[in-house]
Image (cartoon, rainbow, N blue to C red):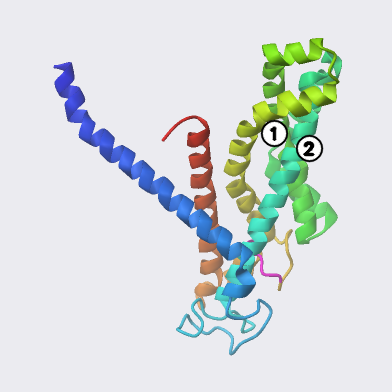
């Protein structure tokens, strides 16, 4: 009876696996296309992002795929440049978060207990408050600009990595090869660089890849609230917010930047899932 049930489930299991692989493959392909577009926006975009090309509020057509905005800019070109802006900004925030979290987490995990307690209490204080609220407060205090938005997001993005690195460091310090290195008199710095960091690299890569989509959404949210890039900078969140007032008369102005944000977030999350599955031995 059990074998019959397993045989009956086998086709459904195969279908689920195929669907999962197709989803991951499609997400990775989309991720690759977005990366190429982000890197080559000046070559792909038919017009400059700040270049009026015709009359305002022109609907999508063969000449302007996404129409024109209230100034006469080509929305398609601005979405391409906005994708580049969001992509580069998310990478900057993630790299800063990883660097700061790595430093604090490694010191806490490998240092004396009193220092660990101090650093982790500071980390817990940041984690206790929703990151988006802190980012909004910091961005509002600094003033609206893309640089200030990146500073605000980076300020709240490191605690998660600090917690990961601290846990990994405390686990790795108990490994025989690390204990042997410490016992042999190797400096703490060399122990971290040669033995601890390589052991947690895959965990950090998985966490960072999953975070890119969340950073894109957070940056778009700040820009939507008027705390990010100021017009006419081609940033997706700012473009969606600016075009919202024309939604009923020129729907393409806010819709296409919003769709770009959704596609980037989806592709980044699927790519992160693929990296996590690969790191965990999944298929």
User: Can residue 93 be found in the magenta stretch?
Assistant: no
Q: Pointer 2: what residue?
A: 100
Magenta part of the protein: which range?
A: 233-237
Element on which disc 1 rests = helix
88 or 137: nearer the viewer = 88
When asked about the image quadrant of residue 205, the answer is: top right
Q: Is residue 61 visible?
A: yes
Q: At which x and y percent is residue 44?
A: 57, 73
Q: Quadrant of the N terminus?
A: top left
Q: Is residue 9 above or below residue 76?
A: above
Density class for disc 2 (Cα within 10 Å; few <14, some 14-19, many ≥20) is some
At x 66% / y 26%, what residue is drawn? 199
Q: Pointer 1: what residue?
A: 161
Element on which disc 2 rests = helix
In this image, 194 relative to 272: left or right? right
At x 59% / y 66%, what residue is drawn? 240
In this image, 87 relative to 196: left or right? left
Q: At which x and y percent is residue 200?
A: 66, 28
| Disc 1 to disc 2, C-alpha distance | 8 Å
């Amino acid at each position: 009876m059990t074998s019959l049930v397993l045989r009956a489930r086998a086709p459904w299991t195969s279908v689920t696996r195929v669907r999962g692989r197709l989803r991951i493959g499609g997400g990775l392909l989309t991720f690759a296309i977005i990366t190429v577009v982000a890197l080559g926006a000046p070559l792909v975009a038919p017009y400059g992002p700040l270049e009026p090309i015709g009359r305002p509020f022109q609907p999508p057509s063969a000449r302007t795929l996404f129409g024109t905005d209230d100034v006469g800019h080509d929305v398609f070109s601005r979405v391409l440049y906005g994708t580049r802006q969001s992509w580069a900004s998310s990478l900057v925030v993630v790299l800063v978060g990883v660097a700061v979290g790595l430093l604090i987490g490694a010191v806490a995990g490998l240092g004396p207990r009193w220092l660990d307690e101090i650093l982790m209490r500071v980390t817990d204080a940041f984690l206790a408050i929703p990151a988006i609220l802190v980012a909004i407060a910091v961005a509002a205090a600094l003033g609206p600009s893309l640089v200030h938005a990146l500073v605000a997001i980076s300020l709240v993005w490191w605690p998660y990595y600090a917690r990961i690195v601290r846990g990994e460091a405390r686990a790795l310090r108990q490994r025989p090869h690390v204990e042997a290195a410490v016992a042999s008199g190797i400096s703490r710095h060399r122990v971290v660089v040669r033995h601890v960091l390589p052991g947690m690299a895959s965990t950090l890569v998985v966490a960072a890849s999953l975070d890119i989509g969340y950073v894109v959404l957070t940056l778009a949210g700040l820009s939507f609230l008027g705390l990010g890039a100021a017009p006419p900078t081609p940033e997706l969140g700012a473009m969606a917010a600016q075009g919202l007032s024309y939604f009923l008369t020129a729907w393409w102005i806010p819709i296409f930047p919003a769709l770009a944000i959704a596609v980037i977030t989806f592709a980044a999350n699927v790519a992160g899932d693929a990296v996590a599955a690969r790191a965990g031995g999944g298929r």
